Image (cartoon, helix red, strand yellow):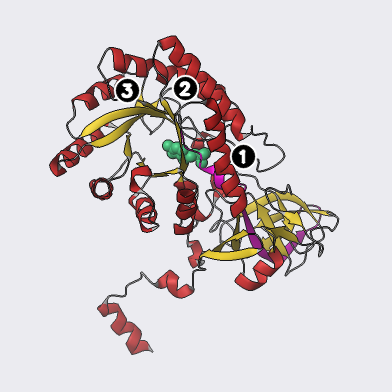
Amino acid sequence: MYLHGTSRINEQGHLEIGGVDTTELAAKFGTPLYVFDEQLMRETMRAYKSALEATGLRHEVAYASKAFCTLAMCRIVAEEGLALDVVSGGELHTALKANFPPERIHFHGNNKTPDEIEQALNAGIGAFVVDNFHELELLGALAAEKGVVADILLRLSPGVEVHTHEYISTGQIDSKFGFDLQNGSAQRAIQESLKTKGVRLIGLHSHIGSQIFETEGFKHAVEIVGDLYAKAIHEWGASDLSVLNVGGGFGIRYTEEDAPLLAHQYIEAIGTAVKSTFDRLGLPYPEIVIEPGRSIVGNAGTTLYTIGSIKDIPGVRKYVSVNGGMSDNPRPALYQAVYEAMLANRAREEETEVVSIAGKACESGDMLIWDVKLPSVKAGDVLAVSCTGAYNYSMASNYNRIARPAVVFVQNGQADVVVKRESFDDVVSLDVVPARLLDGVLSQS
Ligand SMILES: *Cc1c(COP(=O)(O)O)cnc(C)c1O
């Protein structure tokens, strides 16, 4: 397993993260446990900021909170001076509860409800990224009713195809997201928004996909969206236009097959594309916004599990089951995502067997890793799966009524719980038994 950030093997031969022995974390907080390397998250945020600084362009980094959104995470993002993307009332509520500055919040999503729009208008968020005509009309009406003007960006679908998994690719024409350029709806949306009371068009947005390993797609999107930006100013009088948001999707290394670029390489390419495009168009440079999610938290997260049953089918496969699975990490089942792992308690031992890691949910598809090389495993070993920081906790479920794990942040030898482990009572806490059924229960007991 590749060791990211502050991860290392300590003198006891244990995996250590943030100066804390992970076997001690497992003993103290139980497993499954999500462990986040706080220093690595902060360093990555700073790397994006300084790379943008170096382009000389006005800029903002917005952390796409859907990758991992908790109160403590919002605090770190606020402390580091980043902006925050939310895509639902729940994420917005989390940010506001964490005292995240509302003017640095951007609201995304392809079906914001009237209630969510109200909530965001009441909070005074920085900008809405409007996805479709229904939303434009709804937002305009609700803002006008309140006597406010909401700053908006339009989410465009620029028709750029990137090489990534179908379900996480979003910039192509056949996508549920955004206004299409090819069929003219993006052009119409710009004109429409300039006529809509209650909104002010300040920028154009595109997000071409996720887990992207090259810069071509971003360059292509900047050129396409830049052309429309110029047209909006020159032909349609979009005088408040000043922001070009190029989205997120910067890739990370999950396994040795993945070869992402460094933060500054993506940003330099984007900066160069913006400058050459806007020079060509004869326009002042816009403010650049990027929206990394996965690349800020992905490598910083490690999940610790305890190994339980082992089923050896000689000559076929050895299934090693852990006390978690698709309920804490649905990505292998959802996207065929691939992860690396190691034994946290025997990190220096020779890897002598190839096994497959099974989750405990009642689904044959609940497999966390096919074919991983480990030392000879036994029940009670602590398995560490790396790069689980993004889209794991945020996608976790209570399938099989499995309680969701705790989350700890580690740094400088200190571990802080940032999400408590769910109890079984938490799992049933929203259940309601109507009186007529309760009678039945009481009479039986
Ligand atoms: C999901 C999303 C992101 C973040 O994508 P990552 O791959 O996690 O970096 C950024 N912008 C938008 C609009 C998104 O939907």
Depth order, front residue of 300/428: 300
Q: Position of residue 306 (x, y in %)?
A: 67, 66
Q: Are marks 2 and 1 in contact (CB under 8 Å)?
A: no
SS for callout 3: helix
Identify residue type, mark 1.
Answer: Ile
Q: Nearer the viewer, residue 267 or 426?
A: 267
Q: Residue at x 31, y 83 (%)?
A: 440
Q: Which residue shows up at 25% across the image and 45% down it?
A: 121
Write down the quadrant of residue 347 in the picture. bottom right
Tell which circle, 2 or 1, labels the residue nearer the N-terminal end.
2
Q: Position of residue 432 (x, y in %)?
A: 32, 72
Distance between the alpha carbons at the discs numbered 2 and 1: 21 Å
In percent of the image, x 42 and y 23: which residue is there?
Answer: 158
Look at the image and tell me whether residue 217 can be seen.
Answer: no
Q: Is residue 346 magenta?
A: no
> Which amino acid is tagged 3?
Ala
Looking at the image, residue 217 sits to the left or right of residue 10; the answer is left
**Callout 2 crowding tier (Cα within 10 Å): few <14, some 14–19, many ≥20:** many
Return the residue at label 2: 221
Q: In the drawing, does residue 281 fall left or right of residue 6?
A: left
Residues in magenta? 289-318
On the image, numbered disc 3 is attached to which residue? 186
Relative image position of residue 380 (x, y in whole percent): 72, 70
> From what the image shows, is residue 197 above or below residue 353?
above
The residue that disc 1 covers is 252
